[in-house]
Every structure is written in C-alpha cells, then in structure tokens.
Amino acid sequence: MMKRLLTWGIALACLAVPGLAVAADYPDRPISLMVSYSPGGATDFQARIVSMMSADEKYLGQPIVIVNKPGAGGKVGWNSFASSASTDGYDLAAYNVPHFIAQSIKFETKYTIDNLEPIANWGADPAVFVVGKDSPFNSIADVVKFAKDNPGKITVSGAGLFVGHHIAFLQIEKATGVKLSYVPHKGGAPALKSVIGGQVMAGVNNLSDAFRSKDQLKILGIADLERNKEFLPDVPTFKEAGFDVDDSSVNFRGIMVRKGTPKEVIDKLAKAVPEMFNDPKVVKQMKAGGSPMKVMNREEVNAMWQKRQTYLTELLKDLKDDGK
C-alpha cells in the first residue's frame, strides 16, 4: 500500500511540474528536423548524416526525420517554424548562420535570435567561388579583369538573399570594385547545378557542395581567413588573391527549437545532440562528404549567435545590395 501511494505521489508531482513529466518520457516517438533548403544541398546532406545515429539508445533513442521546406533563401521554412512549430521538443529545425540572422536584420521575418533556442552546432562551411569546368576563368584575377571590362555581365548564382553566399558575393563586389549580377536560387543544390549546367557564369556556394562536385567545376577562391587544408589545400583565399574578403560568410549549421520548449527537454537535447555529432560514424561520413565539422555546445552557440547578431548588423550597413 505504501509503495502504491509513493508511486502515485511521484506521478502527481510530475503532473504538477509539466516539464518533468515531458522530460521523463522524452522522446517517445520520432522527431522532426526541418531543413529550410532543397534536398541534396549541403544543409540537407549534412543534416541527414549528423542525425543518423539519433535512434541509438545512448543518444535520443528515436529517429530524426528530415522535412524539407525550401524557399526564399530559407525564409519560408524558418518563418513557418518560428510561427507554427510545436514547443514539445518533437519539432526541431536546422539553423544556418549568418543566413537567418542576416535575414532577420534585413527583412521583416517571424524569426530572430530572440524567439529561437540553439541546441548544438555541427559544422562551419566556408563559401567558395566556382565556375564551370569549361569556363575561360582560371583565377579570381581572371574574373575581376573580365568584370572590369564587362560590368554586370558575369552572372553569379547563390542560395538566396542574405544567406552566406549572398554576403560573400557582396563582399567580393566591394573588395574587387567590380559589378557582378547575383542570381538567387532556392538552395545550394540548384544554385550549383546552374553553374555546372551553364545557366550562369559563376557561383558562390558551400565548400562541401563544391567539393562533392569538384570534377565538374573549377574552385577559384575561398572566403575564409585561411585555406582549407583538409579538403581544398590548393584553393587560395580571397585575401591571398589580394582582395579583402574575410570569414563573415562562413556557414555555421546546427539544431534549434522554438522558444517556449521546456527547459528539461532543451537540457536533454543539449546533452545528447553534441555527443551524437561526435559519434565516430558521423565524423567518418562527414569527412567522406567533404563537410567541415565544428561541434559547439548550447552555451557556445548562444555566444556565437549574439556575437554574429552584433557583427552582421554593422557589416550589412556597409554592403551595398542593388536587389539582384
């Protein structure tokens, strides 16, 4: 009798504190992870790898199911997530920084760093400047020379407006003093296909996407502070080529939830997810796919978000965008 009363007492205590009840059983069904970009792009490709071990009992014990919701450089998916996703821990979203922060600065969006909660970061993917295999351009200097003689004639694809690709593009225009024409797409995959297919003359894309398609491209420059020795050791940075383009466009990727998700659920995710990212099977698959990893915990991501919010607010004031 005493044992039964004790059990009932614990149950009533959990009901009195909803978060405890949720956390005790969470997760007890599959979890959704929304990706705001097209299937096959870098974010989608990497999200499927980093979440593949989630069903293992030592992590979450339930599978993570990827749901793609592309459009407007990520705005369609993130607007939907920030306004209608559940806050029970079963709706997660992949974030991209600087993308969602820059968009919240430049546009009227339903998402900001104030109504989203980071869980953990899995990667940091620099932007690269690419041209087709048959392009006459063999260096950034070649591109700049042609662009000076033909203002606005070089079309450059990217995964939408005020994503990392677009920010790198604007920095490249400013640093080189040339006029290029930006062609936004619904994600990195279609943007890269337009370069390979010859629909545009060049593209700014993710290192990881370009690496997987390197046999069909020339990768002329990387928008980072140093070369990527692991995947593209022979590709110079823009700074090495003589142009002041920094690492502002590096694409940080990770997982977040909506603000209002119970702290106990967030804490559970914040413990398990970075460990899942560091699983040897995940690391091996990410390396095979040319995907640079940078695992950060919740506190580190929070600090990164705050720092990027301040930095991008200032950066975007100085980057002219003519709407192309």
Image (cartoon, helix red, strand yellow):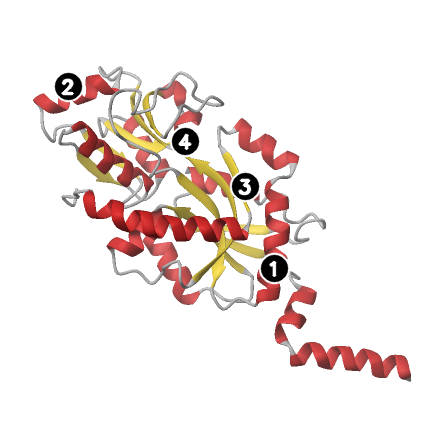
Mark 3 and mark 1: span between their CA atoms? 17 Å
Instruction: Pick whichever, 125 or 243, lies toward us.
Output: 243
Quarter where residue 105 is shown: bottom left
The residue carrying pointer 4 sits among few (fewer than 14), some (14 to 19) or many (20 or more) residues within 10 Å by Cα, namely many
Q: Is residue 218 found left or right of 269 in the rendered image?
A: left
Q: Secondary structure at mark 1?
A: helix
The residue carrying pointer 2 sits among few (fewer than 14), some (14 to 19) or many (20 or more) residues within 10 Å by Cα, namely few
In this rendering, the answer to whether 236 lies above or below 84 is above
Say the numbered circle drawn on residue 145. Answer: 2
Which comes sooner in the sequence, label 3 or label 1? 1
The image shows a total of numbered marks equal to 4
Which residue is under mark 4?
A: 209
Instruction: Pick whichever, 214 or 21, lies toward us.
Output: 21
Which residue is under mark 1?
A: 267
Which comes sooner in the sequence, label 4 or label 1? 4
Mark 4 and mark 1: span between their CA atoms? 32 Å
Please indicate, yes or no, whether residue 154 appears anywhere in the rendered image. yes
- Name the residue at 46% across, 64% down: 85
Please indicate, yes or no, whether residue 161 appears anywhere in the rendered image. no
Which residue is under mark 3?
A: 295
The image position of residue 278, as x and y in percent, is: 61, 39
Amino acid carrying mark 3 in the image: Val
The residue carrying pointer 1 sits among few (fewer than 14), some (14 to 19) or many (20 or more) residues within 10 Å by Cα, namely few
Which comes sooner in the sequence, label 3 or label 4? 4
Amino acid carrying mark 1 in the image: Asp
Q: Is residue 12 found left or right of 132 in the rendered image?
A: right
